[in-house]
Structures are given as structure tokens and as C-alpha cells.
């Protein structure tokens, strides 16, 4: 992270020499205050993560097929990874139906959930945010209503949709009114995938909408007035003004939602229990965990790398500026962009861009 | 909160004498209003309709589970009795208690540890500050499933996967509650008027007094909102709770997911909806009371001006 060096160099250079003692004191206090958090995160996240990597290169303890003797694990090399990536069960290809053989199905269905859910959430969230960004009575009521899906635990959401998606349930009755025949929402391959997407979109679009709304509320009204005087159409206004000005909060929201769906577990585990090819990568890890620890560790490491890589792509190329550095450390290419309200925010020293809510997915 | 969109949609100011223009203006204004109210109706329905259906079903007699009358019919409290009944091996009442304990301890630890880090990140300049923020944000994006295998092994070696070992649930919960707490609090603290602290010092307060008498009351809403968000996150957690809980520590989300009915393979829908209502209603009340604070907590940080 070269930005760290840049950002810290900025303020210290500007300070007069006599303030050096004060800065040193500040740094010491800073480290002291941050230390407990770093210790906690090291023990709770970083150590288990490294432990998982270590486990992933070991064999399960068990009977050696060659000698028939009980062996205590030992090094597995990369066999736990080839098990998933190359579908190898020992020396041979995994038989269909084995957990190892389900990897690519789980991978593609997780990707499918992610892309479809996030695209729908962005479109709907944008629309919701634009509705809420107007002046109307009962703003508090609408905001509270939209927070309800966010507040309901995912496990309860899954059970609620399981009930609504039942064969005799309300959704089949409602689609009956428009002439669609009843669907097997929790077992048919396509219907089950969309059942999960519908439940996920219902629960998380409000979060997306609220983040976009917060971005919209920063756009000063005179920008729109100027556009109107210049004769811009509504569509042009949206495309040339609204969209570029909400781009950063939107990308942050998309990043957090994408990572959330990539690790989706609660919804498919409870709503469809993996039926109809809805076993997500996280579900596959849990399934494998009961069969063999070390293979599960390899798979969870693959999931972790997938998520880390996706986050990297978003932050590097997608403009999801999750950590705001002071303007002095902003890269040169940012300079000729239109100044957005976020730049102002960066000057006030607010270092956090936006929140993700761990929805437990 | 400017009404940018409204000003944009209400067209040019009406000039006197041009009644035709006024008429068009009036009509487009009215159409925009109608469209807005349709949109608002969709929003409210979106948020409330499935929740409403859960509550209606929770109060509906089990014999009429799939009755699709849109208003409450065959009203009964039996489903709530069934939900709390332990006759079929469900321990929903106990699970409520476990979730409360786990939620409170998780929130308390996350707040206690997080408030110091947030203060440092919001107020102080020190080398490596942005690296620390990066680690915390990375932690918030961390997939919970990556913790399952290593922690399962560690916890079973420690003998924590049986009996009433709440720490086996609290410790993994802190892994997501702590990052959530820190970035919400950091955003809140960064926006506080810290110059008041200096004024208090100039007026003769000690640093401790300035913090206690001036800054703490100002920070209270932010601290409170953060605590609510952390508690809700812990209350709603399922994956880790499912993996690390025992009969004596089972949380509500796990209890609801595993609810068994009178016969195997027969889902006790109405009782589950009753249980879901009980689990959700406290959260809905919190949302109603603190919605403004929760929204600002959710979107705290860079998206504010």
C-alpha cells in the first residue's frame, strides 16, 4: 500500500517543526488505542485464516487405503485444492454426486446469484432512492417501512419466503391471477434459483436504496437548475449529472453487496436446502466440513481468495473508494474529475466511506 | 435535504397571461405527483407486505394455513403456544434467552474495544492509520465460512462445542461485530464538533472533564446507534451459530430454521411464522423508534456532506 506512505507524509510535512513532539505523542496514543482491536482481529480472523491455509495442505486422519493402517494425516501437498479445482478424488476423477464434483456447479450458481441479484438491486435501488429523494409527507413512515426487510433476520426471511413459495402458498395464488401455472419454487431448478434471488432482492434492495439516497442528497439543487436552464432532458440530467455524482457511493454499495452474495449461505441453506442446484459455495464448505476438515479448509480458502480478488478488482478498477485518504494523497488522475461532495468530505478527514451491514448472508 | 428532483420536474416558472403554459405546467406537475405517490405505495408495499403476511399467518388457525384472505381470519394465539412448546423438541423460548445473552455480550465487547480504535482513527494522525482502516474494512468483508473449519477444530480441542459455552458463539460474532462497530463509530466521531472540546479546555475544564461533560453527551446518539447495529447483526447471525451452538446455546435463528412439526417432513408453517414474528417484532420496534439514527448509521461516513 503505497498510499499509506503518501498519506502519512502529507500532514507531517506541512506541520511546523515545533509540533513534532505533539505528533509523536499522537502517534503513540493512536497505536495504544488501536492495539486492542488489532489483537482481537489477529486472534479471531487472521490466526484462523492462516490455520485454515495450514489445514488445507494436510491430509485427513484415517485409514490408509494402501496399508489399512490408521494414519495421522500428514502433508497432502496441493491435493485438497486439485480435489476442487481439477475434480480429482485421490488419483481419479471424482464420481458424479461426490461433494468434490459439485464445485463448479456451486461456483457458477453462486456467480449467477451474485450477478443477477446485484443488477436487479442496483436498478430497483436507484428507482427507490429517486422516489425517496423527493419532498413528501410521511417520509419517516416510508423510511421505516423500507427498513423492515433489512431488520428481519435472514433466517426468518428464508422461512417466510419458504411459506410464501409453498405450492399452496400465496405467491402461486398471486401468479395464478395473471395466468401463470403454479411453480415448485423450492425444488424446480429455475424456480428455486429465482426464489432465492427474489428473497435476496427483497431483503437487501432497501440497503442499496438508502446508500444511493444518501449520495443523491448530497447533489446540490443548483446543479439541476443549471442543467434545466441549459435545456437538458430528464434522461440527460440523469445520465450526465445524477449518475456521475452518485457513482462512488453506488460503487461502494455494489462492492459490499457483491461480496455479501458471494458468501451467501442462510437463504439457500434454509429456503431451498440446496435443492434444484442452489448449493452455494459456502453451503458446499459446510457440507464438506462434516466429511473432512482439510478439504473444507481448502475450499474455504478458495472462497476467501475469490472474495478478496473481487474486492481488489472493485477497489482498483471499479472506483469503489472505500477508504478515503486526505486529498494530498489522492492520485493525480483524480484531479481532473468533477469535484464531488465526497472530496469535501475527504477534507474534513472522514476516513470511512460507507457501511456494509453484515446481513449474515 | 434539498428537493432537487422536485425542482427539476416542476417545469419553468409560469409567466402571467400564458394560461396554456400554466395548464401544461399544472398537468405535468400533477402527473409527477401521481407518479411519485404510486412509487411511494410500491415502496411501502415492498417493505411491509411480506412482513404483514407473516404476522397474519402467525395469528391464523393452523387448519387455515393456506387461507389467502388478505386480512386476519380465524384468529388464534395457538401458534404462539406451539412456538414456545417444548413437546416436539423445539426450545424456542430458551433460544431467545441465548440470543439475548450472546447479542449483549458481543455488542458490549465490540463497543468497548471498538470505541478506542474509532477515536484514534477519527481524531488522531499516525503512520499506518490507513493500513489499520484497510485491515478493519477487509475484516468486514471476510467470509464467515472461512472461519468455520479452523475454529471448529480449535473449539473442539478446547471442549467448547458441548454444554453452555457461550464464548464459542460470542468470539466468532465479534469477528464481524467489531469491524462494523469501528467503521460506524469512526464515521460518527469524525463528524463531531471537536472544537467544543478545546473551548471547554480553554474555559478551564480538565481533559477528562471536557470529554465527560461535553463530548460524551454529544457522542451518545452515535454510540447508541452503533450498539443497536451491532446487536442486530449478532441477533441475525445464522451460519456461525448453526456450526458452534449446542442445545444449551442454540440461538433463535437456528431454532427457527430447525423447527419441527407434529409429523416429520411436515412444516409447521403457522408456528414458524409466530416464532418469526416474535423474533422480528423487537427489531421492528427499534427500527420505528430509531429509524433516523439507524439510516444515518447505515450510510454513515463518506456519503455525508
Image (cartoon, coloured by chain):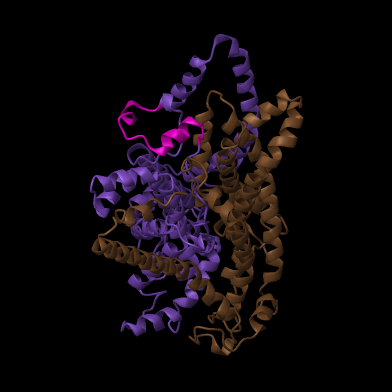
Q: Position of residue B184 (x, y in %)?
A: 56, 44
Q: Which residues are magenta?
A: A330-351
Q: Nearer the viewer, residue A358 or A247?
A: A247
Q: Residue A34 occupies which quadrant of the picture? A: top right
Q: Residue B238 occupies which quadrant of the picture? A: bottom right
Residue B211 in view of the camera: yes
Is A140 placed left or right of A227 in the picture? Answer: right
Q: Magenta span has A272?
A: no
- Image height check: is B22 above or below A55? below
Is A147 placed left or right of A128 in the picture? Answer: right
Residue A324 in view of the camera: no
As drawn, the residue found furthest toward the top would be A17
Q: Nearer the viewer, residue A344 or A48?
A: A344
Q: Nearer the viewer, residue A253 or A44?
A: A253
Q: Nearer the viewer, residue B288 or A167?
A: B288
Q: Magenta span has A345?
A: yes
Q: How many marks on residues? A: 0
Give the colour chain B carries in the figure. Answer: brown
Q: Position of residue A76 (x, y in %)?
A: 45, 44
Q: Position of residue B262 (x, y in %)?
A: 61, 84
- Image height check: is B6 above or below A187? above
Give the colour chain A carries in the figure. Answer: purple
Q: Residue B38 occupies which quadrant of the picture? A: bottom left
Amino acid at each position: 500500500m503505497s498510499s499509506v506512505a503518501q498519506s502519512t507524509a502529507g500532514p507531517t510535512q506541512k506541520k511546523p517543526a515545533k509540533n513534532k513532539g505533539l505528533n509523536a505523542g499522537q502517534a503513540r496514543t493512536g497505536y495504544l488505542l488501536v492495539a486492542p482491536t488489532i489483537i482481537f482481529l489477529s486472534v479471531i480472523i487472521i490466526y484462523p485464516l492462516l490455520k485454515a491455509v495450514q489445514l488445507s495442505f494436510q491430509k485427513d486422519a484415517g485409514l490408509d487405503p494402501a496399508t489399512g493402517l490408521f494414519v495421522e494425516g500428514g502433508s497432502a501437498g496441493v491435493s485438497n485444492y486439485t480435489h476442487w479445482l481439477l475434480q480429482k478424488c485421490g488419483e481419479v476423477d471424482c464420481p458424479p454426486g461426490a461433494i468434490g464434483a459439485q464445485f463448479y456447479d456451486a461456483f457458477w450458481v453462486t456467480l449467477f446469484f451474485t450477478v443477477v441479484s446485484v443488477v436487479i438491486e442496483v436498478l430497483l435501488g436507484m428507482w427507490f432512492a429517486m422516489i425517496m429523494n423527493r419532498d413528501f409527507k410521511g417520509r419517516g413512515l416510508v423510511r421505516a417501512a423500507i427498513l423492515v426487510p433489512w431488520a428481519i433476520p435472514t433466517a426468518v426471511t428464508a422461512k417466510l419466503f419458504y411459506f410464501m413459495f409453498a405450492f399452496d402458498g400465496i405467491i402461486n395464488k398471486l401468479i395464478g391471477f395473471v395466468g401463470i401455472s403454479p411453480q415448485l419454487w423450492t425444488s424446480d431448478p429455475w424456480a428455486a434459483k429465482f426464489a432465492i434471488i427474489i428473497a435476496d432482492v427483497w431483503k437487501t434492495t432497501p440497503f442499496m436504496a438508502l446508500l444511493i439516497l444518501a449520495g443523491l442528497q448530497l447533489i446540490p439543487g443548483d446543479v439541476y437548475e443549471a442543467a434545466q436552464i441549459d435545456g437538458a432532458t430528464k434522461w440527460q440530467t440523469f445520465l450526465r449529472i445524477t449518475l456521475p455524482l452518485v457513482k462512488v457511493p453506488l460503487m461502494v454499495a455494489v462492492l459490499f453487496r457483491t461480496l455479501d452474495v458471494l458468501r451467501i449461505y442462510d437463504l439457500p441453506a434454509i429456503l431451498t436446502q440446496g435443492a434444484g442446484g442452489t448449493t452455494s459455495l459456502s453451503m458446499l464448505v459446510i457440507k464438506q466440513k462434516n466429511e473432512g476438515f482439510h478439504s473444507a479448509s481448502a475450499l474455504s480458502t478458495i472462497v476467501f481468495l475469490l472474495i478478496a480478488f473481487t474486492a481488489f478488482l472493485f477497489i482498483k478498477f471499479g472506483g469503489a473508494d472505500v477508504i478515503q485518504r486526505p486529498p494530498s494523497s489522492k492520485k493525480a488522475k483524480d484531479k481532473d474529475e468533477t469535484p464531488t461532495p465526497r472530496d469535501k468530505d475527504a477534507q474534513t478527514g472522514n476516513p470511512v466511506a460507507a457501511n456494509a451491514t453484515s446481513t449474515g448472508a | 435535504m434539498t428537493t432537487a428532483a422536485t425542482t427539476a420536474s416542476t417545469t419553468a416558472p409560469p409567466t402571467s397571461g400564458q394560461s396554456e403554459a400554466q395548464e401544461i405546467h399544472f398537468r405535468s406537475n400533477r402527473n409527477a405527483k401521481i407518479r411519485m405517490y404510486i412509487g411511494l405505495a410500491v415502496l411501502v408495499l415492498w417493505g411491509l407486505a411480506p412482513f404483514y403476511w407473516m404476522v397474519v399467518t402467525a395469528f391464523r388457525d393452523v387448519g387455515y394455513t393456506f387461507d389467502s384472505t388478505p386480512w386476519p381470519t380465524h384468529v388464534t394465539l395457538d401458534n404462539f403456544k406451539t412456538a414456545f412448546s417444548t413437546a416436539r423438541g423445539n426450545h424456542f423460548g430458551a433460544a431467545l434467552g441465548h440470543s439475548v445473552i450472546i447479542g449483549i455480550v458481543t455488542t458490549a465487547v465490540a463497543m468497548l474495544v471498538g470505541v478506542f480504535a474509532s477515536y484514534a482513527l477519527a481524531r488522531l494522525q499516525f503512520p499506518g492509520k490507513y493500513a489499520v482502516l484497510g485491515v478493519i474494512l477487509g475484516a468486514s468483508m471476510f467470509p464467515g465460512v472461512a472461519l468455520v473449519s479452523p475454529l471448529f477444530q480449535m473449539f473442539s480441542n478446547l471442549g467448547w462445542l458441548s454444554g453452555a459455552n457461550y464464548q464459542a458463539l460470542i468470539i466468532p460474532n465479534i469477528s464481524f461485530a467489531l469491524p462494523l462497530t469501528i467503521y460506524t463509530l469512526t464515521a460518527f466521531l469524525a463528524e463531531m464538533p471537536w472544537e467544543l472540546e478545546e473551548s471547554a479546555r480553554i474555559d478551564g475544564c480538565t481533559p477528562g472533564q471536557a470529554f465527560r461533560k461535553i463530548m460524551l453527551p454529544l457522542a451518545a446518539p452515535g454510540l447508541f446507534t452503533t450498539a443497536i447495529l451491532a446487536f442486530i447483526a449478532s441477533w441475525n447471525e445464522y451460519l456461525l451459530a448453526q456450526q458452534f451452538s449446542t442445545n444449551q446455546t442454540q440461538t433463535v435463528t437456528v431454532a427457527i430454521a430447525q423447527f419441527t412439526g407434529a409429523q416429520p417432513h411436515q412444516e409447521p408453517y403457522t408456528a414458524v411464522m409466530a416464532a418469526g414474528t416474535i423474533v422480528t417484532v423487537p427489531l421492528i420496534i427499534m427500527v420505528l423508534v430509531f429509524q433516523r439514527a439507524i439510516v444515518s448509521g447505515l450510510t454513515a461516513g463518506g456519503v455525508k456532506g
